[in-house]
Each structure stands twice: as C-alpha cells, then as structure tokens.
Image (cartoon, rainbow, N blue to C red):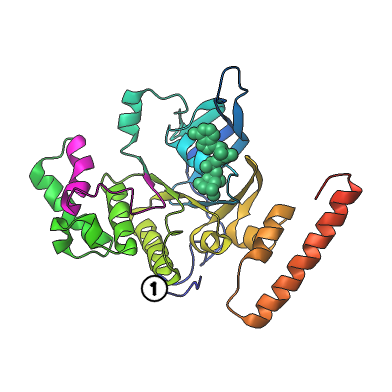
C-alpha cells in the first residue's frame, strides 16, 4: 500500500504529534461470550477484558489474525454481539445494554461499512433508494432525501446518474463507495469499518482508503477500522490496537505500533507483510525467520509448544 496514491497525501497520523481529542467511545473491560452449541455446552469467550477508546475525529485501527475477535468487537459496539461483562460508553452513556428503541436513536450516530460490497447492498434496489432508505426512516421528506442523496453521491465521488442504477451495474470499488455513502447518510459520529477494503484490488484499496481519510477531514467522523492488514491500518489510523485470541495485546500511536511492535504476535505480523522493494523484502524474510526461531526457542524454554 503506497501512502501517496490519490488526492489526500500522507496518512491519518501524518502531519504532527498526538492531538488531544474529546472522547467519543470508551470500552471498559468488555467481555463477550457466545452461547455454546448444544445442551449444557460451555459458552465461548470471544473477547476478554477489552479496553479501548476513540476520540472525536480519530481512527483506531484494529488489527489481528483471523478469529482474534475484531468483528466481534465492532459488532458489540453496534449492539450486535452479546455483552457479558464490562461497559461500552458512547458520548458518556453506557450503551452496552441499550434497548431496541435506544438503538434506533443510536443508529443515527453509529454506522457500519462491511467488507463485502456485493452482499451488503440490496441488489433489487436502485442506488437512490438504497441511500434514501435511512433518511426516510429518520423522517426526512422525499424532497429533503433527494437533495441529501445527491450530496452523498458527490461526497463519495460517484456521478449523480448513479441514482437510477442497480448495485450490479457497479464495480466492487464503486459499490463500496455506495456503502460508504449509505453509512454517511445520517451524518454519524462513528463508523465501524469491518475490513472495508479487503475485497478490493490494491489500487482500488488505495483510492477507497483516501476517500475514508477525506471524509474524516471534511466531517470529523471517527472510525473503528478493522483490518488484518498492518499496512492498511498504518495508512488510515491515528492509533492502532492489536488483537490476539480475544484480547488486546498492544495499542498505541499507529506509527509506533506498526514500526516498533512490542508483542511477539505483532512482530510476526509486521515481518509477514510484504514490501514493494525486493531487497527489503529479502531482509524482512530473513528477519522473520530469525524472529520465529527466537520465539520458538523462548517458548521451548518456557515449556510451551511453539
Ligand atoms: N455468532 C457467533 N457464535 C459463536 N461464535 C462466534 C460467533 N461469531 C464469532 N464467533 C467466534 O468468535 C471468535 C472471534 O470471531 P470474529 O469473527 O470476531 O474474528 P475476526 O477477528 O473478525 O476474524 P476474521 O479476520 O476472520 O474476520 C471466533 O473464534 C469465532 O469462531
Ligand atoms: Mg472479521
């Protein structure tokens, strides 16, 4: 992932040190357990004592291997995963056990963009109707909705004639722009982005990432940005949290965590991510083998199977 592609140069964290931001979301000691399958089956603990916070206009990147609990954390924030313990505080209010009615109100402020633009949009609806739907639910008149839909298409870089087209008439990158426009419709304060560029090819990824950055600059929205790709997360995030087996094992400023990781898992993740220069790639591969060997010996000494 090159940081320079597209109109927004640099990454989220570039251009100065850490900013003081008002807190938007705080997750305190969150535990999520999925019910076990079958009679008397033990519940499965997907998240253990998670602590994160996201400031206004800030992006927290969430990185970790498959099954580490990234989606579960995003879903818990959206009220879609069973909270067994701890709290989720949004704008000072505990929303971890919000009622359906409270959730409906919250959906104005909390939105989501999923990985797969092919399944997340209703294939039978024209783009204009897809974007007008949340506006209608929140009581906007058809004329207001129409005006807002045009603004949204412009904001995500789609032509205004997209209104009368169906999702299948767009490329993956364009569909993801529609999904982003839908998430933006009600001017949310936080968007949970769950692997939103993972299904796109590299150059489309770069353009869609730049769109996320531009939108944040224009609107001040915050992102919880999930990815398994350290390069993507580095580009988009102010801070990064690393998940491993349902826990946050490391978090801090994006530049620092992604260049000088402290946890063995993050070190492996960093050295596994490809770099465009063959010589640096060769060195990275050698470093990775050395690190894996050191970690294997440490595990052996600690009596743990590597
Ligand atoms: N609805 C569910 N019921 C039971 N277990 C679940 C459920 N959803 C997720 N899990 C389990 O919780 C753990 C975390 O899953 P999650 O989808 O959050 O991981 P992830 O980090 O998003 O992975 P990926 O990178 O593959 O998307 C996994 O072991 C998964 O099998
Ligand atoms: Mg996931």
Residue at numbered disc 1: 6
Q: Which element carries disc 1, helix, strand or loop?
A: loop
Q: Is residue 16 left or right of residue 109?
A: right
Which residues are drawn in magenta? 112-138
Rendered location of residue 289, percent (x, y): 77, 67
Rendered location of residue 45, percent (x, y): 61, 31
The residue shown at (54%, 25%) is 35
Rendered location of residue 94, percent (x, y): 47, 27
Q: Is residue 279 left or right of residue 89?
A: right
> Is residue 124 positioned above or below 140 on the image?
below
User: Does residue 135 show up magenta in the picture?
Assistant: yes
User: Does residue 122 show up magenta in the picture?
Assistant: yes
Q: Residue furthest right?
A: 301
Q: Residue furthest front?
A: 38
Rendered location of residue 188, percent (x, y): 33, 44
Whether residue 53 is visible:
no
Residues 231 and 122: in front is 122
Q: Which corner quadrant of the figure contains ligand 1?
A: top right
The residue shown at (49%, 48%) is 21
């Amino acid at each position: 992932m090159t940081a320079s592609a597209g109109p927004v140069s640099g990454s989220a964290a570039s251009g100065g040190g850490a900013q003081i931001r008002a807190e938007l979301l705080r997750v305190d000691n969150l535990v999520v357990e999925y019910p076990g399958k079958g009679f008397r089956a033990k519940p499965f603990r997907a998240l253990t004592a998670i602590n994160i916070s996201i400031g206004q206009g800030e992006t927290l990147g969430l990185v970790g291997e498959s099954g580490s609990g990234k989606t579960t954390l995003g879903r818990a924030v959206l009220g879609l995963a069973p909270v067994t313990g701890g709290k989720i505080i949004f704008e000072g209010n505990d929303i971890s056990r919000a009622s359906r009615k409270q959730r409906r109100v919250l959906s104005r402020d909390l939105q989501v963009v999923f990985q797969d633009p092919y399944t997340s949009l209703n294939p039978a609806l024209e783009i204009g109707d897809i974007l007008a739907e949340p506006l209608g639910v929140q009581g906007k008149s058809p004329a207001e909705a129409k005006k807002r839909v045009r603004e949204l298409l412009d904001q995500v870089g789609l032509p205004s004639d997209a209104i009368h087209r169906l999702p299948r008439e767009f490329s993956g990158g364009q569909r993801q722009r529609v999904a982003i426009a839908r998430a933006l419709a009600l001017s949310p304060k936080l968007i949970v982005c769950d692997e939103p560029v993972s299904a796109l090819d590299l150059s489309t990824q770069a353009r869609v990432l730049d769109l996320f950055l531009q939108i944040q600059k224009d609107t001040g929205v915050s992102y919880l940005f999930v990815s398994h790709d350290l390069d993507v997360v580095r580009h988009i995030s102010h801070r990064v949290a690393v998940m491993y087996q349902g826990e946050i094992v490391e978090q801090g400023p994006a530049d620092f965590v992604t260049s000088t990781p402290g946890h063995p898992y993050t070190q492996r993740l960093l050295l596994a991510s490809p770099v465009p220069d063959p010589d640096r790639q060769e060195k990275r591969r050698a470093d990775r083998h050395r690190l894996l060997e050191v970690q294997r010996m440490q595990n052996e000494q600690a009596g743990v199977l590597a």
